[in-house]
Amino acid sequence: MIDLHDTFKQISKLDISGYGKDFLLTWEKSNDDIKATLFLAELFKEMHRQGLTYKTFDSGLALSIFRDNSTRTRFSFASAANALGLEVADLDEEKSQIAHGETVRETANMISFMTDVIGIRDDMFLGEGNTYMREVAEAVQTGYEEGNLHQRPALVNLQCDIDHPTQSMSDLAMLQKTFGSLENLQGKKIAMSWAYSPSYGKPLSVPQGIVGLLTRFGMDVTLAHPEGYGLIPDVIDIAGRQAKASGGSFSVVNDMKEAFDGADIVYPKSWAPYHVMEKRTELLKASDRDGLKSLEKEALANNAGFTDWECDEEKMSVTKDGKALYMHCLPADITDVSCEKGEVSKSVFDRYRKDTYIEASFKPFVIASMMFLGRLDDPINTLGKILNKSEKRF
Amino acid sequence: MIDLHDTFKQISKLDISGYGKDFLLTWEKSNDDIKATLFLAELFKEMHRQGLTYKTFDSGLALSIFRDNSTRTRFSFASAANALGLEVADLDEEKSQIAHGETVRETANMISFMTDVIGIRDDMFLGEGNTYMREVAEAVQTGYEEGNLHQRPALVNLQCDIDHPTQSMSDLAMLQKTFGSLENLQGKKIAMSWAYSPSYGKPLSVPQGIVGLLTRFGMDVTLAHPEGYGLIPDVIDIAGRQAKASGGSFSVVNDMKEAFDGADIVYPKSWAPYHVMEKRTELLKASDRDGLKSLEKEALANNAGFTDWECDEEKMSVTKDGKALYMHCLPADITDVSCEKGEVSKSVFDRYRKDTYIEASFKPFVIASMMFLGRLDDPINTLGKILNKSEKRF
Amino acid sequence: MIDLHDTFKQISKLDISGYGKDFLLTWEKSNDDIKATLFLAELFKEMHRQGLTYKTFDSGLALSIFRDNSTRTRFSFASAANALGLEVADLDEEKSQIAHGETVRETANMISFMTDVIGIRDDMFLGEGNTYMREVAEAVQTGYEEGNLHQRPALVNLQCDIDHPTQSMSDLAMLQKTFGSLENLQGKKIAMSWAYSPSYGKPLSVPQGIVGLLTRFGMDVTLAHPEGYGLIPDVIDIAGRQAKASGGSFSVVNDMKEAFDGADIVYPKSWAPYHVMEKRTELLKASDRDGLKSLEKEALANNAGFTDWECDEEKMSVTKDGKALYMHCLPADITDVSCEKGEVSKSVFDRYRKDTYIEASFKPFVIASMMFLGRLDDPINTLGKILNKSEKRF
């Protein structure tokens, strides 16, 4: 439980003058931007717990574009928008004319006349999702400058091919809650590890988001994966540079247990190798079904060599006091529950189930925070007024 | 037209201390709970008629899960949520990852962080719909107790395999309006009768809901159906016990006209025999298309032996003064209108069309009432404040 | 930029006593009705630009029925509803039971208990869309008179087989903005011209909407199309009569360049010939796939004879000072962008792209205006109160 007014004071001391309208990659944001986003999410969460409203808009649309399936992020987005007073309008590309040759620029403008925020999930195609988000951002920026949009909608990345900032920021909030403060994260060891899954083609954005964010807080970040399961090289570079600058470390190993050794936190999660995702993107673009089938076969066969990359009790036992915090973005592939052999054993998952739910519970508030800081011209001033009113939600 | 303040007084005298968060089966609710739900629905309806608002929440989500098609219940749910200030968020299981092995518990928690009410329709599988609702209820209860949910969402059964409480409560409201009071229902005869339809597989929940609710008010309830078209035995037991306790009667006959004889109210409605629904559930689970086809064929052939189970002028003539109230949950299979031979003749339906529309018009307000009483800690106090304010909707 | 209070004064001097609940065809509306709709749209737009709210309802549903794909109109409708305080509820005919034999009357009533406005797009079938809208209007009118609806929802035509009033009114707003006033439109020449497109089956409602509206303002309206590409004869008659009454002119020519000669405004847009749409409607109703394929082939072959009906620099050069305003409802078929050969050349479109976006930007406000004027009993009085409050949207 945090104190609302202390948190407000902390936020108001930060320099968020360069925050910008969009939240696309955590590593484009300054440390103060990251902290403001995090603290505001926690403040909104505590207000909700206390039954206080932080409704900011009396009307306005929050536009969502989901180019991949989603349950939790869809509801987190809807929750965040609703709490701020915005109504969700989903751009369903099947029902719209988007498939019929409309350019991104035109569509982005046509649906933004009264839109305050835009959330996009586009994580299927390597090299495309984040690019698409930037095209939309540029389109609405131009529309605003040219005068056909009265306001510049703020964009929130709800998962792309490169980063998953609403997830990694929720994870950061969970760590802050668990360890007491961001400062306390210094020197803590986290193992972001690949884990076996009987499926293929899982996006890289979660592990990339984790190493791209947590290397900024002086942590010892170990990325573990079998040979050939690497992430996008640029993100690895960024993680290395950030670790150095923050006084932490970043290393890549090819052994799950080695990574777990002495870890305070473990994050075992499957993903597809970078080169498989590249190949898959090509095949998807070419609608090459046979190619996709044989790639899947090949990738699964490859995965099958690493079924021992499971987060089980034995591996947990080598972590710090055998009690590392287990994290997952959910849904996890749980051995004997959702599959025969998966990312995590049933007993480990069961022990941490409650924690993973709490980890997830930050997401709606993280999104609300990104919307609030991106959309408003003077968010701190508005926030102060909302806190002073201290009105009940019902 | 009812008096708002008299109705409020009536409600505030009732003991709803055991109301609970969820409305799943009418026969789990006390008489006072049922009355409170009914009177509050009528009060909300009258407020709406007078252009008064009863908006209670300034933000919050009303989550709907429709596992079967729906028009009227979908809109009734949306209307109820909106009137209370909640925004509908529909869990579309095709767009979500629910099909990919997520457990009910996990999903229920993931979508409930900022959810105030959950409405579920799940009436396709015998033995499953109500069970699913209880799983969701338990999941959010645990989530609330474990602290990852700040609030316990209230559940509303929008039709399951056993009961259809939002329908039966709307029907009860119609009867109260027609006969002046619940007390006046004592000794009134209602014929809940099977009727012929050229389709098959219609749920049992409407007739079960009717005999499960109306036997509580001292009415003479006659259930009529051809041999072999029985309802779930448990519900029949409950109806019998309730009729005895309320000083009414409950009987089952195999003749439509016998049931109509002297009836004050008739409710002719098709349903599938219990044993057909059991068989169908098995086949649906097994995705046995051929089995389903032959079951349909068999069931329709069986139905065809009972085309004279139509509510026509001749049968209406034997009801009380030939003027029984005709009821239906809509849409009805109307002979010569929606089919060659159906549940009701055109002339009978036309005479009562307006009444069936009014019967249906209670549903949004019944749902709003269930949400309000289930979700709020002190609903009577909140209601009093809303009535005192007496604010216009626009 | 307009002055809010001047505009309010202008509106309040108009006689809108016969406005009615529904906006189905512009030519059913009086000149004062048209002006009130237009001025109020502009006033709402300016309020939005200034960050002022015109939220009117504290709750209520805005029901949309889209029987054809739509992006921009869908978002315009959602924006308009949201700005007025109404929540969009979409009647998805796939998810509802509508396909299962429910009558229009019944469904219209069932979904309208708490509905304040209904927007319908139904432009696929010639002779059907507008008829369907009138059936819905009649159904809710009767429902209101019979007492099962507490309020009479207002209907807005979001495009039918005959007219596209939210588009033509947005176009009129664009013309007023460009030329300074409606009075200034007198004597201005507009060329509403067919243009080549590599697709077929585009509705007639845009050109019909344009000639059906702009002939009322003393403009010289020229309709141009290849022989055999005529519009619905009734609309042509109305356009002729209106042109005469307003002191303008209306002529039909079979040459694009002739129409462009000296034009102040050009509106080059493809549509299917009337007789093709009639034939197509028959085939669609009969689900005659082979017939539809051969009709498409035939129609495209016919189109191919008119690829020179492109709005290119050469044709633009013969317009007034070579600088006619180019208009389009979007999306346009742009040569070398969205197709090999289309309605407009890339260079012409690029020069006017910004203008077409601004043209489109009026639509949400036009729809809000139609909702407001149709739904409220005393809209001017309510509008006055809203303006006096002058509250910020956030």
Image (tube, coloured by chain):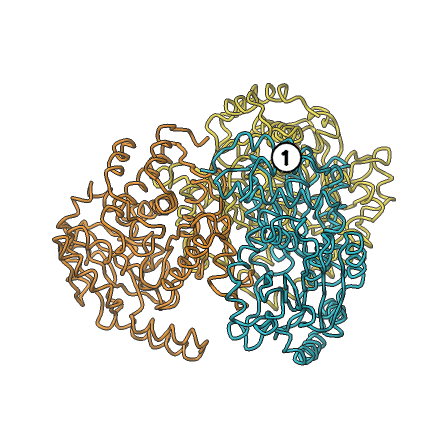
Chain colours: A yellow, B cyan, C orange
Dot 1 corresponds to which residue? B9
The residue marked by circle 1 belongs to what chain?
A: B
Q: Given the current orientation, which residue lies at the most extreme front position?
A: B321
Q: Look at 65% across and 80% down and name the residue there.
A: B304
Mark 1 belongs to which amino acid?
Lys
- C310 versus B229 height, above or below: above
> In which image quadrant can residue A288 be found?
bottom right
Few, some or many residues within 10 Å of mark 1 (<14, 14–19, 20+): few
Q: Position of residue B4 (x, y in %)?
A: 56, 37
Q: Is residue B21 left or right of residue C111?
A: right
Between B8 and A327, the one lying in front of the other is: B8
**Which sits in the foreground, C42 or B258?**
B258
Q: Quadrant of the C terminus of chain A?
A: top right
Q: Is residue B90 left or right of residue C356?
A: right
Give percent across and percent down for residue C319.
Answer: 16, 54
Q: Is residue C178 left or right of residue B379?
A: left
Residue A91 lies, with reference to residue B284, above or below; the image says: above
Residue A200 seen: no
Which element is circle 1 on?
helix
> Where does residue B339 sit, x and y in percent of width and height?
54, 74
* x 24%, y 66%: residue: C234
Q: Is residue C148 visible?
A: yes
* Figure check: C276 above or below C256: below
